[in-house]
Image (spheres, rainbow, N blue to C red):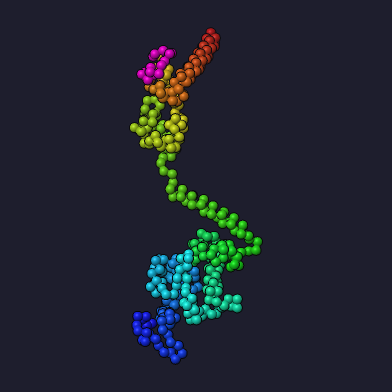
Amino acid sequence: MPTSNNEDSSSSEEDTGSFQFGHDLKPSTEEKLRDLSEQEQDRLLDMVRLEPTSNSELKNKWDLASGSAVHHYIESELKSFYYRDDESYICVTEKAKDFVRENSGLNQYVTKESDSIEDVSENIRNRDLLMDLVSVAQSIGHLPDEREIQTHSKYSPNRFRDEFGGLFEACEKAGIVRDSVTKDDYTAAREKKERERESEAEEEEESEFPPSGPSEAELIEELQWVDEVVEGVPYPADMNDSGAFTTHDYQEKFGSWDDALDAAGIDKEEQLLLDMQAVVDEVGEDMTAPQMNEHGRYSSTMAARYFGSWTEAKERFQEWNNEQEEESESSEEFDNMVNDRLDDILG
């Protein structure tokens, strides 16, 4: 292990015959690097290849439980050999890169155009990204979108954007884009796929959570039963008291109680008009709202609500009454004609 800086200078300086190492940091760093275990050296190599990298990416690479586990590991085992850039990505120090290059065979990746450790790291990083992208495209059978990268790739969509400017550009760099395909084509296909996903998600949600509450047929059947039980047109209160459902169920399904009555074939208008006729027979033609309330089965308020106002209710009653008289006269004339004809036949 390196000697402590707190020791006397005479004991901390060693005559090597060529140099004297005193408080220079280089021997300490080199010794720390040489003392790394095989696993620690492998993981430092991963950091060089992937930089700038993140806790999440290293978690997947090293198969650790969490990003916090990665942070704890590099802080305790590799603290002297890394730093974080302005965007909090993990980067390897220059001295650690030199060590990795000299001891991990990275020199084989140095080319004439790329003769620095930074270029080597970038070449390796890009190569790994592109190899992974090709693997994803082969597994799914088409150019991947960002959602598919998140599902199938070891890297995040942000990594491809950072390195290549975008996912389509990365696909072009990997050589998996046909010459006839443009970025607009790729974008249009991606947007179409996203719409299809949203539609499928909505259908799945509907299938998982079918509409709750009674069906329209069940509501109508129950309303017709209540109509037979109660005298006259059933009120909402009649359903609440005697029926299996609530008026809220009918409002949700039909919009209003009157619309529910119409759907069930219950003629509320005829029931109201017949009730008004019964009151007129009792109090006279000049029927008032209080008289309707006192003598009728239904209130003047119910009639006014149905016809629009009490005045309109009386007008509709008068029209209906005239129609009834005309029908009665027509029926009487027909009966007289039939009787006369029978008399003629019977002689």
Residue 280: image x %, image y %? 41, 15
Q: Nearer the viewer, residue 15 or 212?
A: 15
- Tell which residue pokes out farthest to the front in this image: 9
Q: Quadrant of residue 11?
A: bottom left
Nearer to the camera, 187 or 342? 187
> Which residue range is magenta in the image?
282-295
Q: Report if residue 15 is visible in the image.
A: yes
285 vs 165, left or right, is left
State left or right for residue 236 relative to residue 197: left
Give the dominant element type of the magenta stretch: helix, strand or loop. Answer: helix
Q: Is residue 240 magenta?
A: no
Which residue lies at the image location 48% right of the left edge and 18% below the top edge? 315
Residue at x 47%, y 51% (from the top left corner): 204
252 is higher (above) or lower (below) than 41: above
Q: Position of residue 53 (x, y in %)?
A: 48, 68
Rendered position, 237 above or below 143: above
User: In the shown orientation, is residue 252 left or right of residue 176?
Assistant: left
Please, is residue 322 above or below residue 153 in the view? above
